[in-house]
Amino acid sequence: MNFIKNNLLMIILSLVVVVALVSLEYPLAGWSTRLRREMSTSLSTVGVAKNLAQQTIHIPGQPSFVGPIIPEIINRKQQVQKLMQDQAREIKASAVAINSRGRVVFPYGPKGPVIPLLAGVPEPHLLPQSNHNLVRLANFKRDYQRLFDLARRNPRGWLAQLHAAMPPSEGQIQRLIRRRLSQIHFGLVHQHSDKLVVEKARISRQLTRQAIFQAAAHCRIYAGRFCFQERNFVQSTNAVPSSLDIYNAFVDSWLQSDVVHAIVLTNRGSRDVADSAIKQLFYVRVGAGVKTGRGSLSAGSNLGPVMVPRGGLFLGAGAAPSAQPGYNQYQPGGMTPGYNGGMPPNGPPEGYQGGYPGALPSAYPSPSSPAAVGGLNYGGEMTGHVGTSDYQVTHVAVGVIIAPSKINTFINNMYRQNNGYTLLNVQIRTVDPIDAITHGYVYGAVPAVEADFLFEDILFNQWNGRVMPAAYRQRFGIVVHQAGPRRSFPGNRGSP
Amino acid sequence: MKMKNINPLEQHVEKVVAVVVVLLVAWLCYRNIFQDPNAVVLPGGMSGNVRPGRVGEKINQAVDALRRSVKDAERSANVQRGVIPDYKQIYTLSQIQPLASALTQLPTVAFGPRNQRLQNTINPVAKNWVFHVPSVPRLTDLKAVQGRGVATDTPEPTDIHWVELKAIFPLTRWHKSLAGGSHLKADESGLPRSYRRTTFYRVQVRRQPRLPSGQWGPWVPVKGTYLQPLPQVDLSHATPRQIAAALGLLDQARSQIITPAFHTLEATRHLIAPMNQPQPPVVAPQGPGGMPPFGPGFRPPPGAFNQGPAGAGGARAAMARMLQMQRMQQLQMARQQQQLLQQQMQQQQMQQQQMQPNNGVLQVPPQGAGVLGNNGVGLTDIPVIFYDQTALPGEQYRYEIRVVLYNPVFEFPYHLTDPAAKSQPWLVSPWSKPTKPVKIRQSEYFFLVSSQLGSQGQASFRIFKWVQNVWTVADEWVAPGEAIGNVQQVPLMNNVTGALQNQSVNFSTGYTLVDAKENASGSSLTIVVEHPNGSLSLRTSAWDAANPEQTRLNARVTQTGIAPTPVVPGVPKP
């Protein structure tokens, strides 16, 4: 008690301190924490307002806008989006129109019938389904064969456009030597036999040299008929091309004509093969999965035409039906009604892998191929294009001897032919000019290389689907609205 | 209260506790009063603390700032508008030239083994054939046009006079001369193809001045104007490889040789006076002794040299601003056109160089075709241009022109009808027919304008000079024995700003005043001046006042609005 009395002041002060300390922690501390939390919540509005006032807005074609999002900016963005969407539609329509240029024409407007072009000339009433008129089919076959005519015989022939020729063959050179020796025999007969042999050898060398170089001076490129890919019905006189054959031949001619025109553009202004940028054409192959390289065929050899590739025309379409010799013999009256291109009625056979020679347009994709997502499959080529409901994809392989500085020019000229081309691969090999000249090929004073180009071409279904045979359309699931009743086309040369 | 056995700590413990409590209370007061414990840091990286009582104020400030920024954005958004790219046009253009031109216009790279040349192997040459030496045809259609302007590609704009000569080199005749057959084999096509070369070396010009007697003087060779030095080639001791390299160099410089670049010229200065520019102060021209400087024989045209300072505002100032803007726009357009022309010339030169790569071998031009353009298809004539910048103003000339070509049979390995031609590296064409006389426009005039002598016997002259594409004028009092014309400050237009600015112009005429004498009535003044070549001539104020050339020049100067700076007699010349 005395302690309390003696230390009363201290006890009171201690109690005051204890009460103060406790009150600081509870409940005042809790109230303070809640107050600060509510203040922070309220002050977050300040940050939001500040962020709203400093928004950075990027609109295509407009200067970067820093500030709040105002209705003017929203309207402008909507306008820009609308304009861009309109432009996108126009670009797509323009791309389709450019894609069809030189391949088909619409003589009665875009909604009228579509007429395919063969070397720039309309060939009506053949696609999408031939009307089995033998006269028209024969005219098509004749016109198609004329594309492969030798140079200078047909101005629309590819070889004539290229100013192409081949070096003299050994037989031609021998005949030339014999003829010349017979002409100058009177002057040589009185000479000594040894001198006669030497003189004959000298004249033979001179004539051979002269023949080779004169051939080089009178052409712009070395190319022969069999540099181009032709359909098998050309080889048989009795074969009547089917709709599929005709369509495949049309696509071949479109793409090969583009290659020819690109070479002509690249060689423009040259006087002879030594002056040309592209000096020799080895092959042009069209079709899905074509391979580059000359293979067993020698340069411009006369062993035979370029074989139709086995992969079919379009990616995922299976092989071409006319690849088998004797496949489509002459059939009076055309194809059998209900002909579906040989499609097995009950689906594919067991173990079918797709793409074997002679197979038909397949509705069954190869199980080994990776699945395409959104029309793109990067398991194949770098572009990933495998064909969609908008377009189909095919490949073009070209093998040439070219000046290395003109490789890009040739690629550029190919791109200028059609907007569907994309270069997939280029392989370059050196060329021994001494070896080439021993075979009669003169490449001139500039260096030359052998180049194999692999191009991808896209054909839009919007126009291509309208000339496709039914089997292809069924394969790709293309539904097009054909034009109404056929009208007479003035360019129908084959009409009876 | 007194307690025993208590240590000092126990004795003063209450004081210690009291101090501690006071300190604690003070700290609590300080923290709660001066430091608000509930202040919150502003979010979003903003600096500063906010007390509970100022939260609403901060929010209101932020909202107000947002409203202000919305208003500002609405104003600026209406100003800052861009143009949406025309993607369709971009796509269309990409179809025309899919790859960049830098990729497709690669030069031919010399590497790897080279094949035998095609042209050398056909049409072999027999050793017993004899070939003709080709003759260079005479240039035709020679025309001379004189001009003057301001060269802007020099360090400082320079007034130049020139005569442009244009002629035609008949390429077809030259090719026919190259393809002339040999006398042993009439059907053979002349020189071997590899020797049919057209390489220009020089364009030579000579001129004939008209003498004061009216006769034509001697022919004098003219040094042309070339902005880049022409290549100098000496083939007398060169090896075949060096010859080929030198000819390749000349082929590359072909456009520089036969169609050289000329100065970048400024467009003609506009003749309308800038009324909003400060004009030189108008001083009433005073003659010696307070007499007017112009005698009765000369009266300045109304309005000449007396354009006072323009009004500061109103329609006149607006008109002046508009004229000034038009003047600047036209100047810019002229400069842009000149840049475009230069770019086109450079591109043409590059294309020519790319079309004719020099691989160290003789270039063979296409037979029957020109050397310019794409393989020369359809080109039969080559224009040849020459600029003579040494022509003197006021003189009259006539010109002749010829070209120097590489001799295609230089060091020819076969027989020639003229074997001496094998040692001549160059072939020279005959001189062309002379041009019609061309008179260079005079750039300086002076007239006697005073009809009375000054206080110290001076005579007043008015001197016109063509400077920077405008006529400038200066008045001067000259005493006998003094040269006529000196350096004066003349307001000239600044090319950059378009404003008038005083610049020094040398009005020296080269003439000297020898004597001056008034007539008996004092209405006319007769002077004797000495020509720079020493001849003396007589001038009178009455003749000069009636000179139509002076009237024309006065009108031109009036249009430019550049007034002369009157010189008061008696004031020493600068």
Image: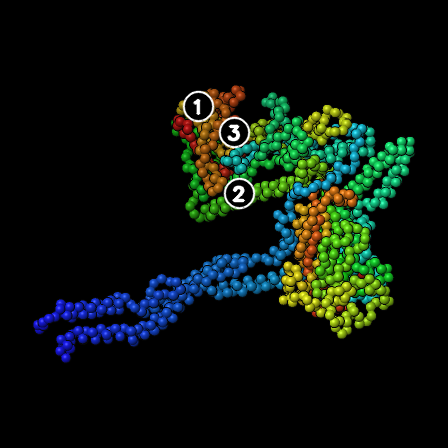
Q: Of tags 1 and 2, which is closer to the observer?
A: 2
Observer able to see residue A128: no
Disc 1 chain ID = B
Which residue corresponds to mark 2?
B331
Query: Which residue is denoted by mark 3 in the rendering?
Result: B445
Mark 1, residue position: B479
Q: Where is residue B25 in the image (x, y as percent from the top left)?
A: 22, 69
The first of marks 3 and 2 along the sequence is 2
What is the x, y in percent for residue A171?
85, 45
Chain of the residue displaying label 2: B
Quadrant containing the N terminus of chain B is: bottom left
Q: Residues within 10 Å of mark 1 (few under 14, many from 20)?
A: many
Q: Where is residue B273 in the image (x, y as percent from the top left)?
A: 49, 41
Amino acid type for the residue under numbered disc 2: Leu
> Gap between marks 1 and 2, in whole Å?
42 Å
Sequence-first tag of 1 and 2: 2
How much space separates mark 1 and mark 3, taking CA atoms? 19 Å
Q: Are marks 1 and 3 in contact (CB under 8 Å)?
A: no
Q: Where is residue B523 in the image (x, y as percent from the top left)?
A: 46, 25
